[in-house]
Each structure stands twice: as structure tokens, then as C-alpha cells.
Amino acid sequence: RLLRIGLIPGDGIGKEVIPAGRRVLEALPSSLGLKFEFTDLKAGFETFEKTGAALPDKTVEVLKSDCDGALFGAVSSPSKAVKGYSSPIVALRKKLDLYANVRPVKSVGTARTPIDMVIVRENTEDLYVKEERTFDAADGSGKVAEAIKRISERASYRIATMAGNIAVRRQRIRELSPHQKFVHSSPLVTITHKSNVLSQTDGLFRSTARAALADLEAAGTVAVEEQIVDSMVYKLFRQPEAYDVIVAPNLYGDILSDGAAALVGSLGLVPSANVGEKFAIGEPCHGSAPDIMGQNIANPIATLRSTALMLEFLGEDAAAARIYAAVDANLEEARLLSPDLGGTAKTDEVVEDILRRL
Amino acid sequence: RLLRIGLIPGDGIGKEVIPAGRRVLEALPSSLGLKFEFTDLKAGFETFEKTGAALPDKTVEVLKSDCDGALFGAVSSPSKAVKGYSSPIVALRKKLDLYANVRPVKSVGTARTPIDMVIVRENTEDLYVKEERTFDAADGSGKVAEAIKRISERASYRIATMAGNIAVRRQRIRELSPHQKFVHSSPLVTITHKSNVLSQTDGLFRSTARAALADLEAAGTVAVEEQIVDSMVYKLFRQPEAYDVIVAPNLYGDILSDGAAALVGSLGLVPSANVGEKFAIGEPCHGSAPDIMGQNIANPIATLRSTALMLEFLGEDAAAARIYAAVDANLEEARLLSPDLGGTAKTDEVVEDILRRL
Ligand SMILES: CC(C)[C@H](C(=O)O)[C@@H](O)C(=O)O
Ligand SMILES: CC(C)[C@H](C(=O)O)[C@@H](O)C(=O)O
């Protein structure tokens, strides 16, 4: 099978980690029967400064017509508001209708408490619709700005369905490995919301997610519970072992996944995939990290895992499993670790160690 | 001086902890020259079920005309959307224009890393304006709900000003205790926002907070920095010692303070004050905790500290200091601790231990 992969490094360390994603794909054993074709694509703040567009039309067109999947690095946020600039990854998620942002957070010897959960974040709406306006206060007290938070039944239903499917898939893996100890031993979906304040919007997310999961729950296949987002952040830190799959509207998902990343010890470990009906973009959860760029010390693992995650959603589980296992082996040995994990290895050394283990 | 205090226990363990707040006020040494008059007031879900109003007009009237301050316990959120019910504390904050929610988070031997920060949360706007609507999607794909997130220059300016003042006050305390080691050794305000996505609303919060703090920064009195909310949650857990005063819009403040509470070991330790020009309501950060209610095991410390915090904002620093010191002494001795802190003491026993130390 030929897979055509767009490569969008973006800014900062995106340029150092996306090549690692390409290398791991190229290094996959030929017995898997996969061939890859790569196209370099532009997006990001640097692209904006050069061309006036943070997400050139060309990038979107090529992804749509010539790619099966893609890897996205990171983009820098300007330190002051810049007219005309807006985040290309947020735009891309919407333009390709990549409605789910799937973020597995798993510790392999890197956390005090073992962590193994998946955050399933809605990826197209909520405050990310970016419909904002600014006006003068009627009482002359200055400016007022408003943003729309939009929650739809359609988007909430499909994201909760995805969360349910992931919970079922995780349970299948548990059953296939009866001797392994899992952090959470049974399938559970936790619905996150703030419907005690936002009764209509988050209320709709909550009731729709409940409806989407009702059959699985009734069949006893997956347990379903709810957490208010503030108390969810609290519990995430106090009892991370209590979670299996978490489903959340866009913004809460954004916040919760950074929180979960803190628990495993580094954002440099946490992958994500932006997933649509027929397309997936792997994207490390970390940002462009201008403070460490150009030093060859960025942790490539978030990108390598994101590459595997992309493969999973493109139906290539066996190839994905190879990459995960190689990454886990590197972490378990803990000999070649990047500085964010307390090691001294360079990005390249970590990549090579992992490639050797494929 | 006579202080007239409204007591609003609300639901669940609110009924067990608010009496502790009253007791500590009554037990203050008479040398402080304070007298208290208490009025019991109703609010909460139980009140809603009995009277149809979660926040009776009477409660608001009495607070406005006959009270100098108040203590608020907690309210239960119904487990399903209930028509006509909406959170009384959110309403109260707006009705009394209690524009700041001040949440000091401090560990006294309860955390792995020492924690000492104050979260200053805007308390009147953002998504808490609760302007929502629901309609049918044009494409027939189901319901859509929208909420308004509103950020004003006026509210952002005054909350950032409050944060600056608190940073200055904390610095004064550092200077008065040159031999004490503080977690963060110099005054710093961290502005939290998500202006990389919400350029107008959070952009306005960011630029207004910057403007409000510009003089203090220029004078070298207080350092000012910014954090995007997701990365703020990450850093809060990785380097809590990097923060002194955090200022945030309403919802981020809500989420961050639960996160910070997890760091000190229990929500049962974290106080808050809802503060306006001439009024303050002390309120523990925890909820009504129906699972442990009626067992006399709720941790009263969040309420006792909230009582002290209310006194501070009513200008009674000396009385507040007594309460803080008595609470700290109880925690340092760690003999009579409630179950959330790993102890076996009853609520009453903890209260009595603290009263003895006044
Ligand atoms: C860069 C930013 C727009 C983005 C987001 O908020 O989605 C990032 O935080 C992420 O989590 O991918
Ligand atoms: C109960 C709820 C409405 C409230 C809030 O969101 O403000 C609570 O979480 C708090 O932090 O005081």
C-alpha cells in the first residue's frame, strides 16, 4: 500500500521533529508492505511573515487532493496580536473536518503514578469557531469583546461516538493481553463539561454524549460517567488512575491534555492525531518551543508517537504497534533520553536509538 | 467595631463548615475589639426545591442592606438540567458586583513541593454571563447551542489592578520577614489567557491587564509575564514555585484554582473570597460533597481560611492573621487532620483544635 504523507514542520522545533517522523516511516520494515511518498508543505508564522498567509491555499489543496495523511509540527504564536494572523492548525482542523483530536497520554517509567488514558477532544467548534467582535461599552467604560462558544448536537454526537469506539478498542487490547496489568482495568468514558454554568451549550454536549454512549452503556460494554471540568482537573491530578477515555469539548480538551502531559513528565512525550472521516494528521502536543530550537535537543517522541497514531487512524495498526514498541523500549531502557526527561541525548540520538529498535 | 455577617450554608457539607466559620469569629480574642452579628440566609438547590428560587430575593436584600460581609458554603448542582435552576453563587457574585475571586493556595506541610500563590479570578463576566441560546441547525443535523464569552476592558482592568495590589502586599510581607523563606521570592503577576485563539476577547484581557500593570512594571515593583492557559496548567504542575500571583478571566481562574488545589493536597484546604468595592464573601473552594455530608468529616479549613480572607478584605488584618496562624499550627502539628488529609479527626475536632490555638 502506498501512503502519501504531507509534511508540515511549521516553526521552531517543528522543523527538528517532523523529519524524525519521516525517518521512522522510511525505516519501517518492508515486510509491512507499506510505501511512503512525502510532500513538504508550508504553514506557520514564518510562512505568514513571508507570504501573508499562515496557511497557504496550496497546502490545503495538496493535503486534500494528493495526501492520505500528514504530520504537523508546531507553530509559533506571535507575542503581540498581529493583524491577519491566525493559527493555521486550528484552520486546518476545520478545513479538513478533522473532527476529533485524539491524545493518548501514557507513561512508560516516566511518572510517579502510572498513567494510561486517552483524551478525545472535539476539534471543530466550541470557542474555536473564532467568531469574535469588539465594540464600545454603552456606559463609556471602554471596549467590550465577545466570542461565540458553539456546541452542536452533530459534533458532540460524533466525538462521543469516537470516544466510545476507542474505549471498546482499548478493552479489546486488555482482553488480548490477560497477563498485563493495565492502569484502568475496564472500559470507561468520562464526559467533561461545565453544565452547572453553561446549561445550554455544555448541557447539550453532556446530553448528546450520553445519548451517543447509551447503547454501549446499556449493553454493559462501556461504563459512562461525568465530571465538571474544574473538578476534572483536580481529580486528574489526584487520581489519574481513575480515567480511561475522557471526552471533552474543544477548549477543555486542550487544557486537560496539557494537564495530563504534566503528569507523564513532559509535553515532549504526548502525541495527538487530528482525525476525520478519511484523513488523519499526526501532531505532537508540544509547541514550537523557540527557547530550545536549533539545538538538536527537542524530544522527538511526541512526533514519533503521533506518526504511529496517524498510521492507526489510516488503518495500519501493525505498523503503528512497531513504532510504539520501539519508543517504549527506548523509554524503558532510559539510556538515551532528551533533556526534558533528565537525559543528555540529542534529538538525533534518540531517533536513532528508536529506529534501531524497530 | 461591629461586623454584621450573613451566613449562607447552602447544601451538603456547606451546612457543616459554615458553622465552623461562625465559631472562629466568635472565638476571636476580645482584645481585637471586634463584635459580630450573624444572620442566617438561604440559597442553594434545597432552597430551590422548597421555594422555586435558588437565590431568594430576601437573601440578596439582607446582604445588601444589613451585612458587611458573608460566608457562603457550597451548593449542589442537580445531576440533570433542571428548568429554572441556576447557580446562586454565580448570581450573587454579579448582583453584589463582587468582581474579584481571590484564591490563595498555600501548602503547610501538605504538598511535595511547597506551594504559595494567589489566583485572582475575574468574577463577573466571561462565559459566566450565561447568555445562551439554542436553535436548530440549518442543515437539519440537530440542535446547536451558543454561549457568549464577554470580556470587558473595565472588568479586566480592575481585576489586573487587584492582582497588582496583591503582589505588592505580598512583597511587603516578604520584606517584613527577612528571615523567612518564601516559595517565590519576588513579586510577579502572571497573566493567563488564550489569545492565540481568541485574539479579540482574550486579546483584550491580555492588553488591558498589561496596561493596568504597566506602572508597577515600569517602576520595577512587580514583574509581569504571560502564560497561555493550556501551557499554564502544564507549568502549574511542573513548576508551581514559578508563580506568585496569577490573574485570569473567570473560567480559566475556575479551572486553575482547582488545579492548584490538587497541588496542595486537598480542595478542603483552599479558601476564596468574592470581593467587591465594599463587600466580601468568604467561600471555600470545595463543593457541597454530597458523598461525605452528614458524617462530620468535612475539612473545615477551607472555610476557616475563607473567613480570615473575608476579614482581610474588610480591613481586619490582625484578626485574619490570628486565624491563619491557628490553622497553620494545626497543619504543622498534623495530629488532628480530617480524612481528606489522611487523618481521622472529625470536623468538630479539627475546629476545636484550631480554636484552642487562637
Ligand atoms: C496552538 C494552539 C492554537 C493549539 C490549540 O489550542 O488547539 C494547541 O494548544 C494545541 O493543543 O494543539
Ligand atoms: C459551582 C460553580 C458554579 C462554581 C464556579 O464555577 O464558579 C465553582 O466551581 C467555584 O469555583 O466557585
Image: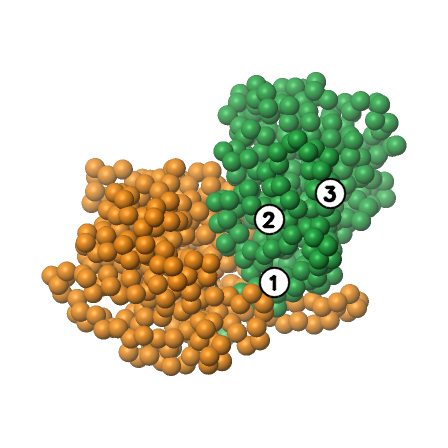
Chain colours: A orange, B green
Some atom of ligand 2 lies within 8 Å of the CB belonging to the residue at label 2 = yes
- Disc tally is 3
Estimate how packed mark 1 is, as few (under 14), some (14 to 19) or many (20 or more) residues with alpha carbons within 10 Å: many
Q: Residue at x 19, y 71 (%)?
A: A2
Kind of residue sitting beneath label 3:
Arg
Label 3 Cα neighbours within 10 Å, binned few <14 / some 14-19 / many ≥20: few
Mark 3, chain letter?
A: B
**Residue B254 — which label?**
2
Please check whether the numbered discs 3 and 2 fall on a single chain: yes
Residue at which label 1 appears? B202
- Where residue A299 appears, as percent x and y from the top left, is 35, 54
Left or right: residue B95 versus residue A63 is: right
In front: label 3 or label 2: 3
Disc 2 marks a residue whose amino acid type is Asp
Amino acid carrying label 1: it is Asp
Q: Which residue is the site of mark 3?
A: B169
| Label 1–label 3 contact, CB within 8 A | no
The foreground one among B352 and B242 is B242
Rendered position, B188 above or below A125: above
